[in-house]
Amino acid sequence: MMKRNHALTFIALLFSCMVGCESNESSEPSTTKSPLPSSMKGYELYSWRTDNQWNYTLITGTNRTKAYDEIVAAGNVESEEWIKISVQGLTNVLQLLDRLPANETISWINSPSRVSGFSLPEFQAVVQIQMHCKRRELNLQVIQ
């Protein structure tokens, strides 16, 4: 009986390690972080692919056109006046969107006339993000 308990404990420990290691995406930013402030001009979302990985930046909406380098620059900023958060992977962008208040407007920019160098991920990922926003009562507009 004692050996069986050790075996079950080992299997449970092994399983929990496997579940915890199934994704190499960072857990940041998580939904346990503080909510993001509402933005008078909404937010802008950008996506691009680097080394077979989709990257996303959520940035405070403004009247000015942002430069490519500004959007993809390393480092995140979270203040009442300015938000710029970059994440990798679908799971992390969904967690990031969870931090937005309901009814917030998000413009997903994929228009070379606004800023070139960005694109949308595969169709299934776009649909997942759209459905997630709908469930969270976020107003997502894809701008092409």
Image (tube, rainbow, N blue to C red):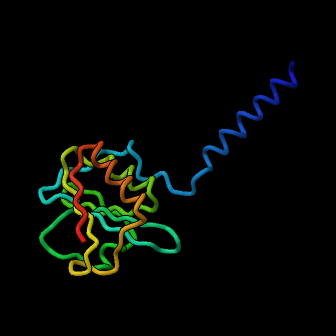
- The foreground one among 91 and 32 is 91
Which x, y percent locates residue 2?
A: 86, 21
Q: Residue at x 41, y 47 (%)?
A: 30
Q: Residue at x 75, y 35 (%)?
A: 11
Using the image, determine if residue 144 lies above or below residue 9.
Answer: below
Location of the N terminus (image quadrant): top right
Count of residue discs: 0
- The foreground one among 38 and 75 is 38
Locate residue 106: give its quadrant. Answer: bottom left
Q: Residue at x 33, y 46 (%)?
A: 98
Using the image, determine if residue 11 lies above or below residue 104.
Answer: above
- The foreground one among 70 and 129 is 129
Using the image, determine if residue 87 lies above or below residue 112.
Answer: above
Which x, y percent locates residue 124?
A: 42, 58
Using the image, determine if residue 54 lies above or below residue 35.
Answer: below
In the shown orientation, is residue 122 left or right of residue 140?
A: right
